[in-house]
Amino acid sequence: MSHNPNSNQPFSGRSVLESLLEAFYAGDMEVVSALLSPDVTVHQSDNLPYSGEWKGVSGFFDMATTLGSNFEIENLSRRIIEQGNEAVLFLDLKFTSRKTGKVGYTTNLEWYTFEDGKIADINVYYKDAVVISALNDE
């Protein structure tokens, strides 16, 4: 399901997230960029190699690059709940460290806020960030 921010269809956070995931996994960064507010902020959990606040579309891509350079990530399952201008993405993930080859599993919750049909804010929570962080330890 693709989301077109210029369409006359009612806004759907689920549609935006499904479009984001579809485009991101397909490598279509032009579509990903179009779904992000220019001022998007991603808040990552502490104690991770990519922790902190990442601001703007370029910050989003810098965070994704840093994440991808540290880990290979497999999405085992996902579920989206939406209400109004917010949506929550639940993910069961398998992380493999590119540095050590160690594998870890966690549940991830991403809380999205939308403005004008685009993703404006993403808060990312890990059930066990320490497990993921430790995967890079020798």
Image (cartoon, rainbow, N blue to C red):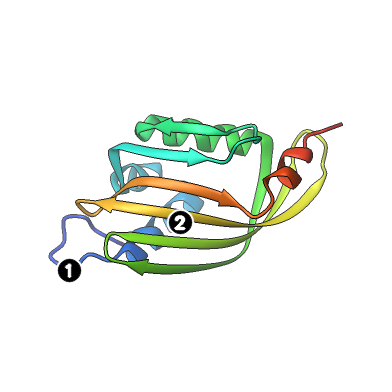
Q: Residues within 10 Å of mark 2 (few under 14, many from 20)?
A: some
Task: Determine which of the numbered discs, if any, sits on residue 50 in the image.
Answer: none
Depth check: give the residue in front, 5 or 44: 44
**Amino acid type of the residue tagged 2 in the rendering:** Leu
Residue 117 showing in the rendered view: yes
Farthest right residue? 138
On screen, residue 93 versus residue 44, left or right, reads right
- On the image, the x and y values in percent for residue 20 come to 40, 54
What residue is shown at x 47% (from left), y 40% (from top)?
A: 43
On screen, residue 11 versus residue 29, left or right, reads left
Q: Which residue is label 1 attached to?
A: 9
Q: CA distance from mark 1 to mark 2?
A: 20 Å
- On the image, the x and y values in percent for residue 117 come to 23, 54
Q: Which residue is label 2 attached to?
A: 21
Number of marks drawn: 2
- On the image, the x and y values in percent for residue 105 come to 73, 56
**Amino acid type of the residue tagged 1 in the rendering:** Gln
Marks 1 and 2, the one that precedes in the sequence:
1
Q: Residues within 10 Å of mark 1 (few under 14, many from 20)?
A: few
**Dot 2: what SS?**
helix
- 136 relative to 76, above or below: above
Depth check: give the residue in front, 32 or 81: 81
On screen, residue 92 versus residue 109, left or right, reads right
Residue 28 showing in the rendered view: no
The C terminus: image quadrant: top right
**Dot 1: what SS?**
loop
What residue is shown at x 42% (from left), y 69% (from top)?
A: 81
What residue is shown at x 39% (from left), y 59% (from top)?
A: 17
What residue is shown at x 36% (from left), y 67% (from top)?
A: 82
Farthest left residue? 8
